[in-house]
Image (spheres, grey):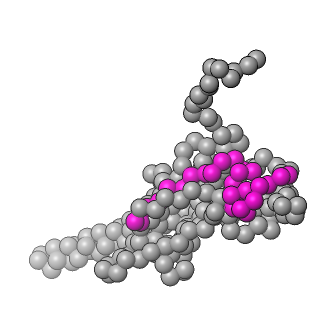
Amino acid sequence: MSKKIANFVVFLLAILLIVGAIGALFYFTNGFNEAPTSFYAVVNGDRVNSLAKGYDLGEKPLTVDVHYIFDSSDKKKDYSLKVVPHLNEDKDFTFTVSGKSYKFSEVGDLTKGFNITYDGMSFVLSTKGNLQQVLSAAYGSEVTELSSVGYPDMFELQIISYNEKSVISILFTLPDKIFVEGIELDQDEVRF
């Protein structure tokens, strides 16, 4: 009788071990929707292992916390960021900077077009304005002609792990209008 109880306990422990392994895999693959990765990000409260889309910088900035999954060392593991175009062949457009014409599909790094505030393993990404203002900031010169107002998920924020083996991509949209929070008028100069 005692051998049957021991076998039953071993069987239960094996089942619990299997269920635990499946649960851990479920957790680290975002519900079996993404490949396992060595790190992840929490973007505005949403856990992202590899790709997320649909964020709008017109609604609020992206607040991102970066986490390494199996970080047992005392050594601080860093990350790097880059903002690049997320291409949509049907929506490609041209713009002009200092008399030279560029295609959006041929643009590289646009990180200078955004405000990034770092706080350890967290950061906040916000826009420097609308599409024209972002492109102007990225190129360091004013965009004089622009054949588009943008499209959904046109930018990709890449969070690159310290060893450059993993990348998390966050797709986002710019606001088509920048809202003014207040206006002050000098009563002596207002004319209608």
Q: Residue at x 63, y 36 (%)?
A: 179
Image quarter (top left, top right, bottom left or bottom right) of the C terminus: top right
Q: Tell me residue 191's x, y (percent).
A: 73, 19
Answer whether residue 37 is visible to the viewer in this image. no
User: For the point 59% across and 28% down, which residue is it?
Assistant: 184
Q: Position of residue 95 (x, y in %)?
A: 84, 57
- Total labels: the figure holds 0
Q: Residue furthest toward the left?
A: 2
Name the residue: 61% across, 51% down: 127
Q: In this picture, is 108 found above or below 146?
A: below
In front here: 161 or 6? 161
Instruction: Tell me the quadrant of the picture where the N terminus can be found.
Output: bottom left
Seen as rendered, the residue at the extreme top is 192
Q: Is residue 123 magenta?
A: yes
Residues drawn in magenta: 120-145
Indicate yes or no whether the magenta region holds residue 17: no
Q: Is residue 14 left or right of residue 5?
A: right
**x then y, percent, for residue 85:** 71, 62
Determine if residue 188 is in view.
Answer: yes
